[in-house]
């Protein structure tokens, strides 16, 4: 599963791309797609570039997605690229807030154009960015409600002019829904369910996993978020620990903040558990990837909760622990995936 604020991990990555890098990739991808001999060839070009985006920005998600069947994996990579770029606009590009909003609004307009275009080529000729041209095919083919991506872009806009959230319920309803829950829904439509009757259970699992992932990423990046002017720890929980105004750089607040982090990590753990409980609702060919995602990020959540220095130190899961959640018979896929360009 994906969640907004995997971007913060990218911010720590020396491989993070500049806006010039993204523009260069886009021009190259469009040129190659328009030279492709068919709709499928054009899609293959874009998917390969989307795979590069995922591999660059999220080692964990890249690893777990290798265990999806090829067609679904391609569609997941298309989704990833479509959410990655707006996230970079908000979090990474060195531009002023008005320009961030302008780029997001342009992206939103291109999304609508992409939905109306009958083919990838037609979308590209209308000026739709390649990753949106590919993503809107997935939206149409999988029957993803178009309003879900609109909700995602609304969450990105809220990050341009951030405000704190009074309670956890308020945070979930007014931010996590757009930043993570709907992204989980995208994936649920791609993964599919065991039977048609199980689909609502799969959506519930996707919702719970989206909340869990987002909470874990918030807890991982308290200091980094504050430097961006954002506070995602609920204000009422901070006040209960005696913190009226968050200052993650203040050592006198660290004990109280650690207590809030542990409380939220416990809540996230309950969401991971409820997501895993409904795992059987998904199509069998996707369960291994979802299980691995729950286990890898659940382990990250545990490490954050146990680390007294989590406010100062950005926690991560060692690669060997990521491998431990996977069947040994599948290990060969990981180095192969990183080797193939």
Image: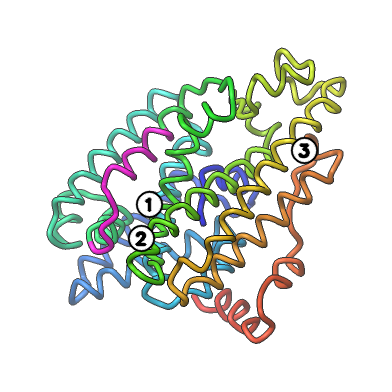
Instruction: Check contact, mark 2 vs mark 3: CB within 8 A.
Output: no
| Depth order, front residue of 62/242 | 242
Q: Quadrant of residue 332?
A: bottom right
Measured along the vertical axis of the image, is residue 17 above or below residue 280?
above
Measured along the vertical axis of the image, is residue 1 above or below residue 227?
below
What whole-number distance in Å separates the C-alpha atoms at marks 1 and 2? 16 Å
What whole-number distance in Å separates the C-alpha atoms at marks 3 and 1? 32 Å
* Element on which disc 2 rests: helix
Q: Position of residue 288 (x, y in %)?
A: 56, 73
Mark 3 lies on residue: 262
Residue 297 among those drawn in magenta: no
Left or right side of 190 for 42: left
Identify the residue at image location x=49%, y=45%.
18
Eye-nearest disc, 1 or 2: 2
Q: Position of residue 322 (x, y in %)?
A: 70, 66
Instruction: Check contact, mark 1 vs mark 2: CB within 8 A.
Output: no
Eye-nearest disc, 3 or 1: 3
| Depth order, front residue of 135/90 | 135
The secondary structure that dominates the magenta segment is helix
* Element on which disc 3 rests: helix
Q: Which mark is residue 189?
A: 2
Q: Position of residue 128 (x, y in %)?
A: 23, 50
Sequence-earlier tag: 1 or 2 = 1
User: Given the current orientation, which residue lies at the most extreme top position?
Assistant: 244
Q: Residues in magenta?
A: 141-156
Sequence-earlier tag: 3 or 1 = 1
Dot 2, how many residues are within 10 Å of its Cα: few (below 14), some (14-19), or many (20+)?
Answer: many
Left or right side of 293 for 141: left
Mark 1 lies on residue: 82
Dot 3, how many residues are within 10 Å of its Cα: few (below 14), some (14-19), or many (20+)?
Answer: many
């Amino acid at each position: 599963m994906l969640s907004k604020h995997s971007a913060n991990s990218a911010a720590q990555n020396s491989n993070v791309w500049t806006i010039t890098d993204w523009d260069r990739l886009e021009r190259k991808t469009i040129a190659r797609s328009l030279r492709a001999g068919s709709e499928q060839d054009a899609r293959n070009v874009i998917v390969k570039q989307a795979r590069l985006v995922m591999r660059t920005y999220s080692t964990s998600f890249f690893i777990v997605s290798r265990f999806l069947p090829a067609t679904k994996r391609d569609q997941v990579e298309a989704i990833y690229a479509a959410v990655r770029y707006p996230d970079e606009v908000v979090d990474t590009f060195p531009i002023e807030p008005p320009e961030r909003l302008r780029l997001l609004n342009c992206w939103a307009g291109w999304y609508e154009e992409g939905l109306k275009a009958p083919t990838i080529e037609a979308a590209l000729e209308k000026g739709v960015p390649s990753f949106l041209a590919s993503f809107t095919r997935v939206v149409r083919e999988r029957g993803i409600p178009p309003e879900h991506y609109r909700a995602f872009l609304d969450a990105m806009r809220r990050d341009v002019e951030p405000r704190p959230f009074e309670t956890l319920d308020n945070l979930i309803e007014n931010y996590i829904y757009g930043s993570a829950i709907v992204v989980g829904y995208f994936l649920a439509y791609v993964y599919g369910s065991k039977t048609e009757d199980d689909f609502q259970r799969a959506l519930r699992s996707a919702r719970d996993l989206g909340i869990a992932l987002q909470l874990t990423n918030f807890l991982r990046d308290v200091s980094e978020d504050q430097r961006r002017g954002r506070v995602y720890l609920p204000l009422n929980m901070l006040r209960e620990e005696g913190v009226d105004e968050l200052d993650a750089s203040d050592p006198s607040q660290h004990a109280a903040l650690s207590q809030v982090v542990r409380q939220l990590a416990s809540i996230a753990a309950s969401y991971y558990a409820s997501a895993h409980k409904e795992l059987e609702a998904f199509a069998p060919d996707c369960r291994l990837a979802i299980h691995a995602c729950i286990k890898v990020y659940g382990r990250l959540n545990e490490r954050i909760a146990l680390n007294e220095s989590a406010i100062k130190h950005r926690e991560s899961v060692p690669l060997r622990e990521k491998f431990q959640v996977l069947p040994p018979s599948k290990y060969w896929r990981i180095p192969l995936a990183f080797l193939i360009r």
